[in-house]
Amino acid sequence: MITSDDILGKEAIDSEGDFLGIVMKLHLDPIQKTILGISIDPGLWRPDLYIGIDFVKQFGVDAIFLSAIPNSKYKSLTVFTYEGNNLGKIIQVNESNSNKREFVVQMKLNWMKFYQKRKCIKIPESSIQELGHSIVLKKNASLEYME
């Protein structure tokens, strides 16, 4: 059996082994009397992350391990084309019912004129070659331009 003292104040580690922050809150269902999720404080000037209990893989002795990477971790990552050009930064991550992600990218000014002054593009996860500290698109990535 574990208590809230065993969870609060522990480090939260995502499925790639990256430190996300410190667990600050437990969210409880008062009717079912179960844990719904946790809130993680990622540090100064960054908003708290809410992680649903379904994404908690294990409550360890010194850390909480997650089974997935929260979508909010991708916000403000730089997106590069296959050729290495900086397209812009991720401003939003959308997830469909089939767990497929779509990334909304705020384009850099020099790319906006190339793409007929559109400010944002949508990139499906299937068009991504590398996903890490930045995002690299596949050679023939499918991009959807937004108004």
Image (spheres, grey):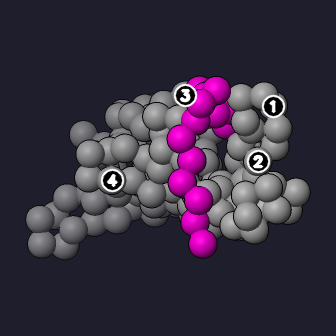
- Upstream in sequence: badge 2 or badge 4: 2
**Of marks 3 and 2, which one's residue comes earlier in the chain?**
3
Rounded to the nearest angstrom, the CA distance separating label 1 from label 4 is: 28 Å
Decide: marks 3, 4 in contact (CB < 8 A)? Answer: no
Q: Tag 3: residue type?
A: Glu
Magenta part of the chain: 129-147
- For disc 2, the marked residue is 87
User: Whole-Å distance between the Cαs marked 1 and 2?
Assistant: 9 Å
The answer to whether 12 is drawn above or below residue 95 in the figure is above
Mark 2 and mark 1 in contact (Cβ < 8 Å)?
A: no
Say which label, 3 or 4, has the lower sequence index.
Answer: 3
Of helix, strand and loop, which one carries label 3?
loop
Q: Residues within 10 Å of mark 4 (few under 14, many from 20)?
A: few
For the C terminus, the image quarter is bottom right
- Which amino acid type corresponds to the residue marked 2 in the rendered image? Leu
Crowd rating for badge 1 (residues with CA inside 10 Å; few <14, some 14–19, many 20+): few
* Marker disc for residue 96: 4
- Rendered location of residue 146, percent (x, y): 58, 66
Specify few, some or many for label 2: CA neighbours under 10 Å numbering under 14, 14-19, or 20 or more: many
Circle nearer the viewer, 1 or 4: 1
Residue under numbered circle 3: 16
> Where is residue 46 shown, x and y percent of the image?
69, 64
- Report the amino acid beneath label 4: Ser
x then y, percent, for residue 92: 57, 61
- Point 48% across, 39% down: residue: 125
Q: Earlier in the sequence, mark 1 or mark 4?
A: 1
Residue 60 falls in image quadrant: top left
Q: Which callout, 2 or 4, points to the residue nearer the camera?
A: 2
The tag on residue 84 is: 1
* Residue 91 location, quadrant: bottom right
Question: Residue at point 64% right, 33% down?
Answer: 137
